[in-house]
Image: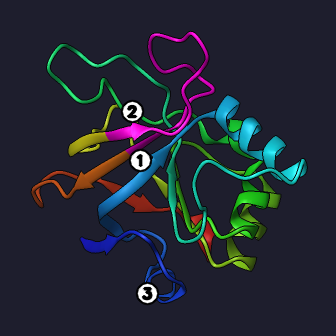
Amino acid sequence: MKPISTPLTDDVIAGLKAGDNVLITGTIFTGRDAAHKKLFDLIQNGEKLPFALQGQIIFYVGPTPARPGKPIGSAGPTTSYRMDAYAPKLYELGLKASIGKGSRNAEVKESLKKFKAVYLAVTGGATLATHTRHGSTWAEAGAARSTPASTSTLRIRPVPRDRRMCTLSQYTR
C-alpha cells in the first residue's frame, strides 16, 4: 500500500503506477454527475467554484443520508463514465485524482496523462474507511439532505492494511 495525502502534487502522482493500492489521508470532495455539471457550468460562466481544485481528489459517490449519530451514510462509488463530459476540464484546472468505478473514455484518459492526474478505481461496496463529514460545499435550496447535485467534503484516515482502498487505474500511464 502506498500512503498518499491531500493535496496531491505532481511528484506524488509521478510516484504512482497502474495497479498500486493507495491509502488516502486528508480531505477529499464528493460529487456525482449533477454536481459535476454545476462545477462545469460555473467554470464556463467564469464564476467562482465552491472549492479550489488544485491538488484535490473528487470521489464519485452518490449521496445517502447518515444514520442517526453517524457523520455520513453509505459512501460507495458511482459509475465514472457519467462524469466523463466534465472531467477533462477539471483535470486541466488542477484536479489531481478522481475515485470511482468503471472505465473512462478516451478524452479522459488523455487528460489524465496531459495534466498529470490519476483515476483511482474502487470496488463497488467498498468503504471510505474511517471518515468524518467535514461539511457540505453546496446546500441545495430547501433540501433536507444531500441531493445528486450536492458536493460534500470528507476527511478520511487510512483503514488497517488488510482492507483494500483504491487501486490506481491502468488509464493513467
In magenta, the rendered stretch is 134-153
Of badges 2 and 1, the one in the foreground is: 2
Q: Residues within 10 Å of mark 2 (few under 14, many from 20)?
A: many
Q: Is residue 171 left or right of residue 4?
A: right
- Disc 3: which residue: 15
Q: Are marks 3 and 1 in contact (CB under 8 Å)?
A: no
Q: Quadrant of the N terminus?
A: bottom left
- At label 2, the amino acid type is Gly
Q: Measure the C-alpha gap from mark 3 to mark 1.
A: 19 Å
Please determine whether, in this image, residue 159 is positioned above or below residue 14: above
User: Residue 74 location, x and y as percent?
Assistant: 32, 25
Q: How are the residues colored?
A: rainbow
Could you tell which of marks 2 and 1 lies nearer the N-terminus?
2
- The answer to whether the residue labelled 2 contacts the one labelled 3, judged by CB atoms less than 8 Å apart, is no
Image side of residue 168 versus residue 65, left or right:
right
Where residue 165 appears, as percent x and y from the top left, is 29, 53
Q: Secondary structure at mark 2?
A: loop
Q: Position of residue 38 (x, y in %)?
A: 74, 36
- For the C terminus, the quadrant is bottom right
Q: CA distance from mark 2 to mark 3?
A: 26 Å
Please say whether residue 85 is visible from this viewpoint. no
Name the magenta segment's main secondary structure: loop
Q: Who comes first in sequence, dot 2 or dot 3?
A: 3
In the rendered image, which residue does mark 1 sit on? 122
The residue that label 2 is drawn on is 76
Q: Position of residue 161 (x, y in %)?
A: 12, 61
Q: Is residue 48 magenta?
A: no
